[in-house]
């Protein structure tokens, strides 16, 4: 592991070249991955499943990966948080972080000393990747510890303190030329914080494949939920039954891709949670990493055809370290592949 971190530290020197609009990935897509010692801070006390041990194998793989610019994680500001969250909730998290006790929701998301500061890194790092992509300094970006899609405007949920995906959507929609954003979520759990945060916003196209809410938290994401008001028809939920594997996922994803393609988004956000792979201790799906490779390959192609290649990916869930490594390494390999048209 020490060798992997040393290699990653060397790779971080490439960030200065990214800031100059230059990449070493000649002939390929320019991919940045946010990773560093700060990535370990968003870790609930053992034996909570959302702890830093789940990302260790991916960290080792990333240390030897080619064609990747490893970028130091960035902390968010209060201004960033308030793009989506209420001032009252942010204050509650800060006070709970000082005390270091209790829960930030009904029982899934415990507080600990420093949880506020730790939770700033997933948000800030996703926003940094978004900035680099929108400025054209990178084509694609992955924040492995981002994708905290359960947090609502005024409360935590499902291990998620602040919702970096929702905050990134708000930031992206304020950028000139970004009139429509696609949010694609393949985590085993329904991305309820994002979905209900933008349920009535027609500028946000949502495609979410997840385990049926009748058998898994948060119990939402019915196929009949397709958006409200002016946004009716801009959302797609595809719940899959427990035990669904690659074949069922690919069939669902083909439908989702066609749906998203019809809206011609200017930016794609991908939440690529690894908890749908077989053997995850919290879920009941049976994907292999081939599902993540397939979804990323298809979105990679769509991004280059529709929105100048702009993809910002976030890791999301996943509680088996080998599954996390396999799923996220598949994502990295696909979006760094120069042959996106295949």
Image (spheres, rainbow, N blue to C red):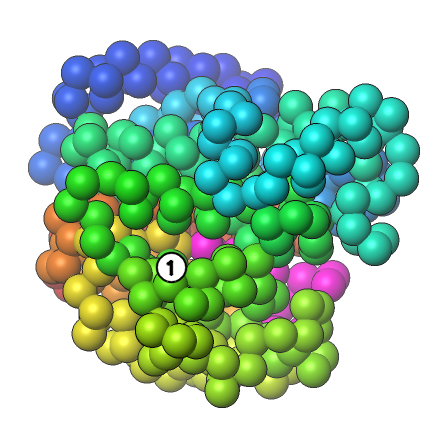
Secondary structure found at label 1: strand
Give coordinates of residue 332: x percent, y percent. Answer: 36, 45
Q: Quadrant of the N terminus?
A: top right
Nearest the viewer among 108 and 93 is 93
Give coordinates of residue 16: x percent, y percent. Answer: 27, 12
Q: Main secondary structure of the magenta part?
A: loop
Q: Please say whether residue 41 is visible from this viewpoint.
A: no
Q: Is residue 109 left or right of residue 313?
A: right
Q: Is residue 338 left or right of residue 256?
A: left
Q: Eyeballing the image, is 238 above or below 101? A: below
Using the rendered view, name the quadrant where residue 34 is placed.
Answer: top left
Using the rendered view, name the quadrant where residue 141 is placed.
Answer: top left
Q: Residue at x 17, y 33 (%)?
A: 136
Nearest the viewer among 148 and 145 is 148
Mark 1: give few (<14), some (14-19) or many (20+) Cα within 10 Å.
many
Q: Residue at x 56, y 54 (%)?
A: 149
Q: Residue at x 42, y 67 (%)?
A: 200
Q: Residue at x 54, y 26 (%)?
A: 78
Q: Eyeballing the image, is 117 above or below 241? A: above
Residue identifier under label 1: 183
Give coordinates of residue 195: x percent, y percent. Answer: 50, 64
Q: Eyeballing the image, is 264 above or below 174? A: below
160 part of magenta stretch: no
Span colored in magenta:
271-285
Q: Quadrant of the C terminus?
A: bottom left
Q: Eyeballing the image, is 17 above or below 118? A: above
């Amino acid at each position: 592991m020490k060798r992997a971190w040393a290699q990653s530290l060397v790779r971080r020197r490439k960030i200065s070249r990214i800031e100059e609009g230059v990449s070493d990935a000649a002939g390929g897509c320019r991919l940045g991955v946010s990773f560093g010692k700060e990535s370990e801070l968003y870790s609930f006390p053992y034996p909570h499943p959302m702890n830093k041990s789940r990302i260790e194998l991916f960290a080792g793989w990333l240390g030897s990966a080619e064609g990747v610019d490893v970028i130091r994680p960035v902390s968010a500001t209060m201004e960033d948080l308030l793009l989506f969250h209420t001032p009252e909730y942010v204050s509650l998290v800060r006070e709970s972080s000082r005390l270091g006790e209790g829960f930030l929701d009904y029982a899934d998301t415990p507080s600990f000393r420093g949880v506020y500061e730790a939770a700033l890194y997933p948000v800030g790092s996703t926003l940094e990747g978004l900035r680099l992509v929108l400025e054209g300094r990178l084509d694609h970006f992955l924040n492995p510890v981002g994708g905290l899609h359960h947090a609502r405007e005024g409360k935590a949920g499902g291990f998620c303190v602040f919702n970096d995906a929702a905050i990134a959507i708000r930031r992206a929609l304020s950028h000139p030329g970004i009139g429509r954003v696609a949010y694609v979520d393949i985590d085993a759990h329904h991305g309820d914080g994002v979905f209900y945060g933008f349920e009535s916003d027609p500028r946000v196209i949502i495609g979410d494949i997840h385990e049926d809410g009748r058998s898994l938290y948060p119990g939402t994401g019915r196929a009949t939920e397709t958006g409200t008001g002016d946004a009716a028809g801009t959302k797609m939920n595809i719940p899959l039954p427990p035990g669904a594997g690659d074949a069922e996922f690919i069939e669902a994803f083909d439908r989702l891709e066609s749906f998203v393609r019809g809206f011609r988004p200017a930016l794609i956000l991908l939440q690529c949670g690894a908890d749908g792979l077989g053997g995850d201790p919290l879920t009941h799906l049976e994907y292999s990493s081939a599902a993540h490779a397939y979804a990323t390959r298809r979105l990679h192609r769509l991004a280059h055809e529709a929105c100048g290649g702009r993809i910002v990916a976030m890791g999301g869930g996943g509680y088996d370290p080998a599954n996390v490594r396999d799923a996220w390494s598949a994502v990295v390999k696909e979006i760094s592949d120069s042959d996106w048209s295949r």
